[in-house]
Amino acid sequence: MASILAVLDPVYRLLPEVKKPEIQGSLNKRITWTIAALVLFFIMGNISVIGIEASTAGQLAQLQTILASQIGTIITVGIGPIVLASIILQLLVGGGLIQVDLTDTAEKARFTSMQKLLAIILCFVEAGAYVFGGLLRPADGMFLFVILQVAIGSLILMFLDEVVSKHGIGSGISLFIAGGVAGDVIWRIFNPLNSLRELAFFGSGANAGAGLIWQFFAGIQFDGVFLSFVTNLLPIVFTLVVFFVVVFAEGMHINIPIAVGRAGHKARFPVKFLYVSNIPVILAAALFANVQLWSSLLTGRLSTVPVVGVFLENGLKFLATVVIAPFRLVENFIIQASSEGIGVFQTIAVQFAQSITTFQLVGLGGQLLHGILYIFLLTVLCVIFGKFWVEMAGQGPQAISNQLEKSGMFIPGFRRDPRVVRSVLERYIPPISILGSMFVGLLAGFADLTGALGSGTGILLTVGIVYRLYEELAKQQLIEMHPVLGQFFG
């Protein structure tokens, strides 16, 4: 198994690839490529699959924006296969089943090719899973054609990701997630089509299809100001809270003093609190979506397996329930507390205990237990994926110390030796990686329980993505003004 990366070299050469430009394009050209990819993504999200009788998102509805998918269109599976391929290989490497030296250029290229090959295979596998799982119902004789359309749509997204990475700015996957979440948030707040009708017939009752702003005003006369605020405006408030918390956290960092050149000019190497970026949350959300997908596919099939079949199916069903957050837990608590008063805590305690003893999520107490399990599982996965990502992305202490040494940088007061720099970086990068992973997991999980628009996880991802896109734009603009800096940023 250790040599499988090299064995598949002939296959890697057959894989289609977006060619990297020999000379990096101008900033305006890269922005144009990025915008073009985003526009194409939105167009694909409005092209329905030919030959289906019906489609349903089911419990995957809340995860669609995070997966950059739109069930029923050619991007039904979204970026799921790409992210799942990354997760599988990370687990194989982390478990020692595949030995790969990511500091070696050839080995890293093979690893990337292996990931692409696996993603291509998973495009077809997941397309079939959506059909077999009942999320897409093909018409008679259209079964294979539907799978082919969905798989090709995901393949196009994969190569659009390459286009953005090599010719545009940032990551295509991140761009598609941010675009989908931002579109969903704006649409749910304002919804210009139904909101115009709501304004025209104001006073006739809240229109469920209208934007939340208009539903708030229309709902005052029926539910009162308080309940209308909780139902319609509180999700917007929580969305803003998550936004400002993430922006604040993005600015937190530790500066490690370094010196440059023979003269020893002083500088600083910042290690950000969110050193792991939003990658762990993307991986965890994709894994949750796949649990949902395979649960819907295997329901009714596992129970036919002798002895352990029923146990496995019930366990998978429970896990599939846990990984979908009770998105409006906070809202439900406020509404119930407003009617029951302090007695709501006794009700929650009884239902919480009942949920633990029966393994059935009962009432508001069951939702609370569900929320605790969801946040715990999300946080643990974020820490695991964050640890893997730091090493595989070349952001670990060893990789960074080698980069600093090649750039002529060293830590003042210490010998100019990469091992010394590495020992210093090891005091900061691993602990901050863990803390940052825990933070994004806890914040995303809590935000999901508040019913924040676009899901708390989606807002967390979008803010982080936009913030890093801004940093990348600023860096590219600086390089264009001072070309010599391009050698350093490399």
Image (cartoon, rainbow, N blue to C red):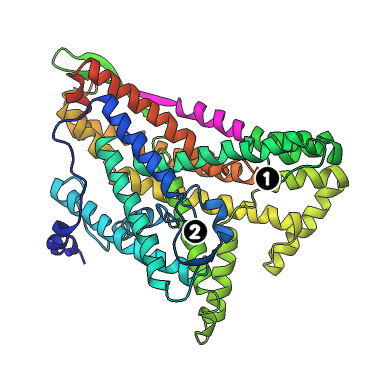
The mark that comes first in sequence, 2 or 1, is: 2
Quadrant in which the C terminus is drawn: top left
In the picture of the structure, the residue carrying the numbered disc 1 is 209
Which amino acid lies under the numbered mark 1 shown in the image of this protein?
Gly
Which amino acid lies under the numbered mark 2 shown in the image of this protein?
Gly
Q: Secondary structure at mark 2?
A: loop
**Magenta region includes residue 4:** no
**Magenta region includes residue 255:** yes
Total marks placed? 2
Left/right placement of residue 9 relative to residue 421 reads: left
In this view of the protein, which residue sits in the foreground, 109 or 53?
53
| 281 versus 322 height, above or below | above
- Residue 476, given in percent of the width and then of the height, sits at 28, 24
Main SS, magenta region, reads helix
Q: Which mark is residue 25?
A: none
Contact (Cβ within 8 Å) of mark 2 with mark 1: no
Q: Residue at x 45, y 26 (%)?
A: 252
Hey, which quadrant is residue 477 in on the image?
A: top left
In this view of the protein, which residue sits in the foreground, 412 or 128?
128
Q: Residue at x 18, y 54 (%)?
A: 110
In this view of the protein, which residue sits in the foreground, 293 or 51?
51
Quadrant in which the N terminus is drawn: bottom left
- Residue 159, given in percent of the width and then of the height, sits at 29, 49
Inspect this view and state whether residue 17 appears: yes
| 453 versus 24 height, above or below | below
| 405 versus 455 height, above or below | above
In the picture of the structure, the residue carrying the numbered disc 2 is 72
- Residue 273, given in percent of the width and then of the height, sits at 43, 32
The residue segment tinted magenta is 238-256
